Image (tube, helix red, strand yellow):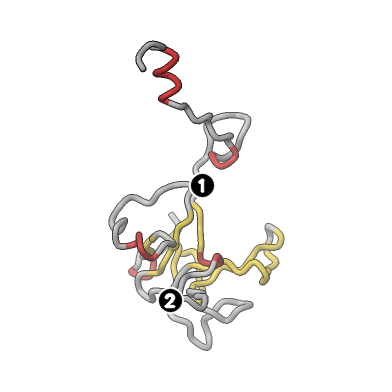
Amino acid sequence: MLYLSSDHRTLLKSSKRSWLQEVYLTDEVSYLNCWQAALPDPQLRLEYEGFPVPANVKILINHCHTNRGLAAHRHLFLSTYFGKEAEVAAHTHLDSHRVEKPRNHWVLVTGSPRQDSPTMLHLPKPPVEDTCALEQATDPGAQ
């Protein structure tokens, strides 16, 4: 089993392009493998702390040891055996209001059991049922 791990940045150990805190996969169990998920809205973070991580919604992933956010740098690419990949590093990017930028937002997407769509995000939204209209249709003389 592989674990997502990270440690403090040093002169010898940092990410290739951005020189930020490196994120890597390892097969060793360690305290460096601990990550925590939180909601992007700062007012809801304490309220949802300790709850299960919701699927198909934006979340923040923070490293427990260094308290840095997992970030995808879409403008920095690495050439790998699989082609061009965006660099992933551990760094919390904040805006002027001290709120995390979209680089730190992640979505855990669930797969769809249907053949026509690969993920649950590709499914069309179900039609909204109006309960008042259903009650009026079943009992027209109720009002």
In the image, residue 22 lies at what x, y percent? 51, 74
- Residue at 41 percent across and 67 percent down: it is 62
Secondary structure of residue under mark 2:
loop
**In this view, the mark in front (2 or 1):** 1
How far is the residue under mark 2 from the one under mark 1? Answer: 26 Å
Mark drawn on residue 44: none
**Residue at (61, 69) in percent of width and height:** 73
| Picture quadrant of residue 27 | bottom left
Establish if 109 lies above or below 113: below
Q: Amino acid at mark 1?
A: Val
Q: How many marks?
A: 2
Q: Quadrant of the C terminus?
A: top left
Q: Would you name the residue on which mark 2 appears?
A: 7
Q: Are marks 2 and 1 in contact (CB under 8 Å)?
A: no
Q: Position of residue 76 (x, y in %)?
A: 66, 72
Q: Residue at x 34, y 62 (%)?
A: 45
For residue 109, the mark is 1
Where 127 falls versus 63 (above or below)?
above
Instruction: Say which of 50 and 23 sits in front.
Output: 50
Residue plotted at (60% across, 29% down):
115
35 vs 90: above or below: above
Q: Earlier in the sequence, mark 2 or mark 1?
A: 2
Residue 26 in percent (x, y) is at: 46, 64
User: Looking at the picture, which amino acid does disc 2 mark?
Assistant: Asp
* Kind of element beneath mark 1: loop
Q: Position of residue 40 (x, y in %)?
A: 44, 62
Q: Residue furthest bottom?
A: 11
Mark 1 neighbour density, 10 Å: few (under 14) some (14–19) many (20 or more): some
